[in-house]
Amino acid sequence: MEPVIRVENLVKRHAGRGFGRRAPGFTAVDSVSFSILPGTTLALVGESGSGKSSLALCLACLERVTAGQIWFEGRDLAALEEKELRAVRPKLQLVFQDPANSLNPRWAVGKIVAEPLLVQARIAKRERDARAAQVLERVGLSAEYLERRPQELSGGQRQRVAIARALILEPKLLILDEVLSALDCSIQAQIANLLVELQRTYGLAYLFVTHDLRMAAHLADEIAVMSRGKIVEQGAAEKILRHARCEETKSLLGAASLAPEAIAAVRER
Amino acid sequence: MNQILEVRDLRVAYGGRDGGVWYALNGVSFGVGAGEILGVLGESGSGKSTLAATLLRLLPANGRIAGGQILLEAADVVQMDAERLRSVRGRRVSIVFQEPSLALHPTIRIGEQVGEVLHAHGTLSKRERGERARGILAKVFSGDIERIFSSYPHELSGGQQQRALIAQAIACEPVVVVADEPTASLDPTTQREILTLFQTLRDQFGIAFIFITHNPALLAGFADRVLVLYAGKVAEVGPTHAVLSSPQHPYTQALLKCVPQVAAGEALRHKALLPVIGGSAPSLAILSRGCVFEPRCEERMEMCQTQEPAAAMLGNRHEVSCLKFPA
């Protein structure tokens, strides 16, 4: 099967900043390669500063890469002009961590969800509203939410709205940047289930960026562990979980454990 | 055990702009022993942040303590006047907030910010405060104290900022520190480091911690006891091992099932749908007659609608507020 996206030797280098004495440049992503098949999930795990969010922004074409290729629908996105990217972006949609900050508080949900249509094409308002209602239903919200504002919604509902906005342009790849980490456990489970169902129904590919190795193992087919801009370990989810080789992976595993051995270590007083 | 903090039947009410009143805490009771780590587990709206603020009487203007007692070393914090309260806050009980980048002053050096706490509670000279602040920083940082001492908050990483806040919290050697989601903004490895620091401080100085979180995974291997808060009430409280590996309250059971299971030896139930808790958290404006979890509970019985469950003791300090267990 042809991958949805194939990344080859991707490098993202941030130029040095600072007034007077210039701070040195910084390589956020350092020769990273991977591919994602349709209907599958690649989880990108790593600590803060490991470069996983930079990589997500590069894939969403919101940051230009320094070197390397991003192959998508037969074209190298890294080589495209800004104008050409506009036609590609609908197929690669990004969902952010905190829906409280990524949704316009002054807009009704219907307008928020339909906004990508407004940006991408000239579509009549009635058609936009119908599409918004349809896509809200796909994420488990009834049409009555169209008129609500984000602050009237719970955290889980807001994240559903953010996912609906990403789905309205019918993307092939969803880039999910820490979409569960701001939510409560019980809500995380609901949104994780939604992601699984959407993937089954529409054959979406996901890049699931997270520092929660447990959730990564649950949702992903493959896991890539990032550290200091490089992928240090990559493989089937089960294999990474059970037979981690790298220290970085082991440390993330230790942090995620609600395992019996951790509980046994509790001192009974 | 020697209880240093005892909360009895605590009720906290918030007034809305429309004149309505809702109870964020509704009859919460628990105790914390000297040098004990109590994990408070709750989801949004459970009242866990209200609990943290109330223990230091830091409620916002529209919140008030509607009843109950907070006995800190046998003195009731609820009854204290402003002057007494000032002498207790930071000296006997202190708090560590969630977002260290907001809790620290951006234009004052770390050393001075730690010294400020000493200044508020003592008569040390500036130089003595500096010496003491260095000593306190040495308890929470390993190495290069001088650099930390003279750094501004923005020059430190998130984990280091959180350590600086912890240094402030322990500066006057309190008996109990309340930590409200102190690791929520940190990545998992730094989270573990901060948890280990709490344990070290407990072991070395006998400080008790009330650690508030929404993440049950953090409490395993860390807290001595776990208190589960739901809709302003204590659902279950007991030794960490008992609460996390054999939860008895239907809410705790449902909550822990939401977390994907990846325990060794078990097959990965890959992309299987996770069990979820049906319905949503109750409105706190309406005081229900029965159990607050009844509308979402899978084991509800007829009496749950009308009868409020009392805490039932299941042995080994494991208490559950559910009518399944006769009190």
Image: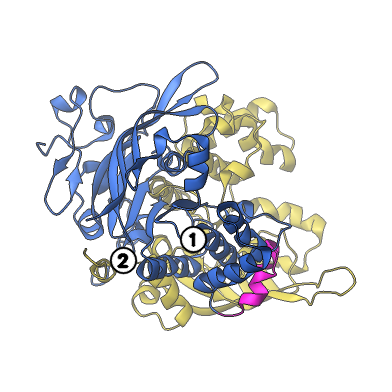
Chain colours: A yellow, B blue
Mark 1 vs mark 2, foreground winner is 1
Along the horizontal axis of the image, is B198 left or right of B27?
right
Magenta region includes residue A212: no
Along the horizontal axis of the image, is B73 left or right of A113?
left
In this figure, which residue is indicated by the disc labeled 2? B221
Q: Is residue A41 shown above or below B3? A: below
The 10 Å Cα crowd at callout 2, few under 14, some 14 to 19, many 20 or more, is: many
Three-letter code for the amino acid on which mark 2 is drawn: Gly
Magenta residue span: B143-156
In the displayed orientation, state which residue is furthest to the top: B19
In the displayed orientation, state which residue is furthest to the bottom: A245
The image shows residue B251 at horizontal and vertical percentages of 26, 42
Three-letter code for the amino acid on which mark 1 is drawn: Ile
The image shows residue A116 at horizontal and vertical percentages of 68, 41
Q: Nearer the viewer, residue A262 or B260?
A: A262
Q: Secondary structure at mark 1?
A: helix
The image shows residue B155 at horizontal and vertical percentages of 69, 67
Along the horizontal axis of the image, is A60 left or right of B311?
right
Q: Residue at x 50, y 52 (%)?
A: B90
Q: Is residue B285 shown above or below A67? A: above
Chain containing the residue with disc 1: B
In this figure, which residue is indicated by the disc labeled 1? B170
